[in-house]
Image (cartoon, rainbow, N blue to C red):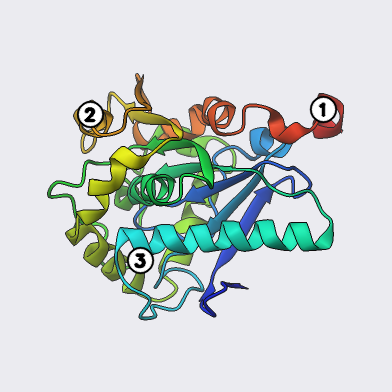
Amino acid sequence: MITLPSGDTVGFSAAGDPLSDRLVLFCLPTPGAGMFDPDPVVTNTWGVHLVSLDRPGYGSTPPGTRGSLIQHRADDLAAFLTASRDAARSSGATVFGPAGVVGWGTGGMVALSLAARHPELVDRVAAFQTAAPQGHTVDPASQSLPPFRMPSLGIAPDHALLERPGVRSRLERMLAAAAEQGDAGTAHDRRALADRSWAKELGAIRADVRLIYADDASDVGRDDGAWYRRRIPSARVVRVTSDGALALVTEWDRILAHVAPDHGGLSAASREG
């Protein structure tokens, strides 16, 4: 748990190298809480400090009354980034520059809203399998009530990549954390998705944006990417041929290459040693 300058408490999880001067925020999907590291071997040797904050109702973040819009979640992240920068400056530690942001699904909307509302804090964004907001909501069949399963994330239970060491267990931990407060998190996301006003600000984004979609995903695809591309001058759509939602695992090194291109200022020897 951490406390934001507003006094609100939010769940906090981190992975990667805490000594890196490159901070990357990871905004999780619906449902999702805690941390999901797509490939810890890549993350741990990349030179990146990967951080995730739980949205209200997920993990250890209380449902609260801090507003239910996508913009409110973006502002929470901005408050965290600003407080982290101020704390580093006052302690004499390395001060973070602009951050990279990765967003999966609903988390991609939060990531893009953060880049639009606080362009001075974000320089690179990777939005993965993020639907256009028109009519998109929580799936009542698979995402409304716990326990949450792989189909809640658009992943077939027998997907071959789930047999890769650690992938299934890491996803299950993320889903279990999302269910700690019952359906409070998904109910919050449903309210957030009902309001599309955040998308009116997309034209303010100055960050370098990649919109990543798997060709074999059935629910979200390149048409969604084209919708965002028309509204974000700095965006480019990237198509992945296979693996659906689990392309996040197979493409993780390419995603980090976008959001943390200089390996956090760490040499290869220090990253791999």
Q: Specify whether 178 is left or right of 16.
A: left
Q: Earlier in the sequence, mark 2 or mark 1?
A: 2
User: Is residue 97 visible to the viewer in this orientation of the structure?
Assistant: yes
Q: Nearer the viewer, residue 270 or 150?
A: 270
Where residue 180 appears, as percent x and y from the top left, is 45, 73
Above or below, 3 relative to 117: below
Outermost residue to the left:
135
Pointer 2 and pointer 1: residues touching (CB < 8 Å)?
A: no
Q: Earlier in the sequence, mark 3 or mark 2?
A: 3
Q: Nearer the viewer, residue 47 or 70?
A: 70
Residue 63 figure quarter? bottom left
Secondary structure category for the residue under label 1: loop
The residue wearing badge 3 is: 147
Amino acid identity at mark 1: Ser
Q: Say which residue label 2 marks.
A: 230
Task: Say whether disc 1 or disc 3 marks the residue closer to the N-terminus.
Answer: 3
Q: Is residue 91 above or below residue 207?
A: below
